[in-house]
Amino acid sequence: MEVAVITDNSYILECFASPTRIKMIELLKQAPMNIKQLSQSLDIKPPIVTRHIQMLEAAGIVGSELIAGQRGQQKRCFLQLDKMVLDFTLPSQQTIVDITANQGKRYEVDVPVGMYTAYDVKPSCGLASQTTMLGMCDDPRYFADPIHRDASIVWFSSGFVEYRIPNYMIYNDQLLALEVSLEICSETPCSSSQMLPSDIVFSINGTEIGVWTYPGRFGKEQGIFTPSWWYKDIQHGIMKHIRVTEQGSFIDGVQLSNVTISDLNIDCDKEILLKISCSSDAKNCGGVTIFGEGFGNYNNHIQVALQCK
């Protein structure tokens, strides 16, 4: 690929200003790697790896795909380019190539589980950070306390939490898909849980995209990232990957509904509302627990991505 050395291509040229990103390219030149493998090889935290990868993806240097892992979906990264030539001559406007025209654009946002902007929850419910409980168990009033922003785990027996997702699309982007990845289970920690199944509903911009039934009887084994002070039975959940396209709504590749990306009314100048709920009158009402960074088996925030062309 030839790249003109002009201001418009700064986002490509800046990729080589970081020794960390250059090391990533060296590693991916040898073999594809997932975020965890890159994190371990570079000895830096996964969220930092993700931000570097996003920059390399935007420049068309690195590509990625979601593949099945031992505990759900994982993002595998690979090198997309064999060669890049820098052109120091000033080309005509017609010769400037927009690499995103072929590779597409991907906007990714990590949303901490405590950063919900609306809620209506019923006990058993609660919040905890990586170091301590936030407020008292089974008291919904603490969901309104500013400390909720520090939460790394959130749970409720019925009701909902809703997140406002920033939308970085620009006016001429054509949205192809929306993806959400998160670690989740039922069986609220402060209850005398019987490990019941739970019908968990996912909604985007007020449109229900589907119901996933958590099977129950899971999550009592020690979570890989769950802090040692945490004494509750609920240690981890299951990583779920939701994808909405023009073909419908899917979870881990299985169709949830016929709701398409066009049905969600996602515009470039509007934020996106993600609601996670469990109704008290659902057939299976086992509650909802959402795991964030510092809890569970994945050490991730809620991850949201928009795929555009």
Image: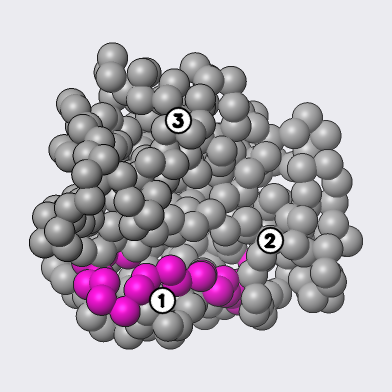
Q: Nearer the viewer, residue 218 or 293?
A: 293
**239 left or right of 92 in image:** right
Closer to the chain start, of discs 1 and 3, is: 3
Question: Where residue 161 appears, x then y in whole percent?
Answer: 60, 72
> Quick check: can you spot residue 241?
no
Q: How is the image coloured?
A: one colour
Tell me the crowding category of disc 2: few under 14, some 14 to 19, or many 20 or more residues within 10 angstroms, Cα based: many
Q: Is residue 218 above or below residue 302?
A: above
Query: Which residue is situated farthest in the left direction here?
Result: 94
Residue at image coords 57%, 71% = 163
Marker disc for residue 204? 1
Tell me the crowding category of disc 3: few under 14, some 14 to 19, or many 20 or more residues within 10 angstroms, Cα based: some
Disc 3/disc 2 C-alpha distance (Å): 30 Å
Q: Would you name the residue on which mark 3 appears?
A: 21
What stretch of residues is rendered in magenta?
Answer: 157-178
Q: Nearer the viewer, mark 1 or mark 3?
A: 3
Amino acid at circle 1: Ile
For label 2, the SS is loop
Amino acid at circle 2: Gly
Question: Where residue 188 appears, x then y in whole percent?
Answer: 66, 56
